[in-house]
Amino acid sequence: MKKRSLIVLCVSLGLMAFSFTTAQAEVKQISMGTSSVGGLFYNIGSPVAQCINKALPELNITVEFTEGSTENLRLIGQQKMHLGVISPMIGYYAREGSNMFKGKPIDFRVVARLLPNGNIWTTLADSDIKEIRDLKGKKVGVGTGGIGVISRGQLAAHGIDYQKDIKPFFSQTGALADILKDGAVDASFLTMELADLVTATHKIKIIPWKEEDLKPFLEKYPYFGEYNYPANRFKGVDYPVLTVDNGIQLICDKDLDDELVYKLAKAASESLDCITKIYAPAKVLTPAWMASKLGNPFHPGAIKYYKEKGLWKD
């Protein structure tokens, strides 16, 4: 009797182990490239992954630490990664095979538009600078890398040659706030977070774009968007600020299964409460925003979901 019970127990345990292994095998493993810990792409990518995992137990998205857009795109192009968080401008370069991707184009598709990511021209409150064209002849923190490319493009859109018309300071992104506070420059091209840091110790003024300047700029550079920071978003700035959205997109391998991408778009769009609980700045996201375009093509699976919800605009 004991021997029989032992056999039954062993069989039961074996079946349980088999069931557990089978259940594990049915969970699809997906990788998502973001950025370094604390970077904006990680800050938004990680909660998106967590909340999709919660909504879709058949998936397990693993967030990978990377160097950002360029590495994420290259890994997706090499089919070493399924998803990535990128700057639309860098994605545009990848598809065109230009700049850092010269001669080596990478194709991909968009799942969703994520956080607005608008840098702002910032001065101290007592500055005589009232519009972007007033930066001519001034000392300006323009930044390096991708931020430097964007700031110089915005200056050019206002007829300002950064080599001739201003004294540029090519400081690292984090240092752009410090040189403004220290008075080393008249204005700096800051992220939202850096502008908030400056307001902790100094009164600031933010220089908005004019609608008549923004429209042709966006027509020329479709990978940028428009964004309005509401009045009082920044301490002491009691007026709305029209600016350029550099954008953030969640992208995928172009050959990823349509049904899978449909589920990803649906889960992300319908998990905004979950995402916001983890990362408060995500409160600005809406399903309509996530379905909006910034220069790069969406995946058919994502388009199908957004069309079903009446969010897609051809």
Image (tube, helix red, strand yellow):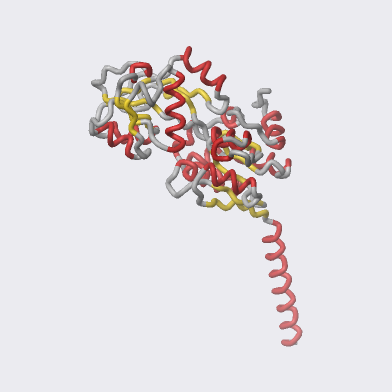
**169 or 3, which lies in front?**
169
What residue is at 62 percent from the left and 46 percent from the top? 76
Q: Position of residue 131 (x, y in %)?
A: 36, 16
Residue 196 as seen in the image, left or right of residue 49:
left
What residue is at 70 percent from the left and 44 percent from the top? 256
On the rendered image, what quadrant is the C terminus found in?
top right
What residue is at 53 percent from the left and 16 percent from the top? 216
Q: Position of residue 304 (x, y in %)?
A: 72, 33
**242 or 104, which lies in front?**
104
Q: Position of residue 264 (x, y in %)?
A: 64, 42
How many marks overall?
Answer: 0
Tell me, yes or no, if residue 270 can be seen here: no
Tell me, yes or no, if residue 293 can be seen here: yes
Q: In the orientation shown, which residue stands out farthest toward the top?
A: 212
Residue 151 as seen in the image, left or right of residue 17:
left
* Residue 75 position (above or below residue 126): below
Determine the image quadrant of residue 249. top right
**140 or 181, which lies in front?**
140
* Residue 75 position (above or below residue 90): below
Residue 74 as seen in the image, left or right of residue 68:
right
Q: In the orientation shown, which residue stands out farthest toward the front?
A: 164
* Residue 186 position (above or below residue 1): above
What residue is at 66 percent from the left and 26 percent from the top? 312
On the rendered image, what quadrant is the N terminus found in?
bottom right
Q: Position of residue 12 (x, y in %)?
A: 72, 73
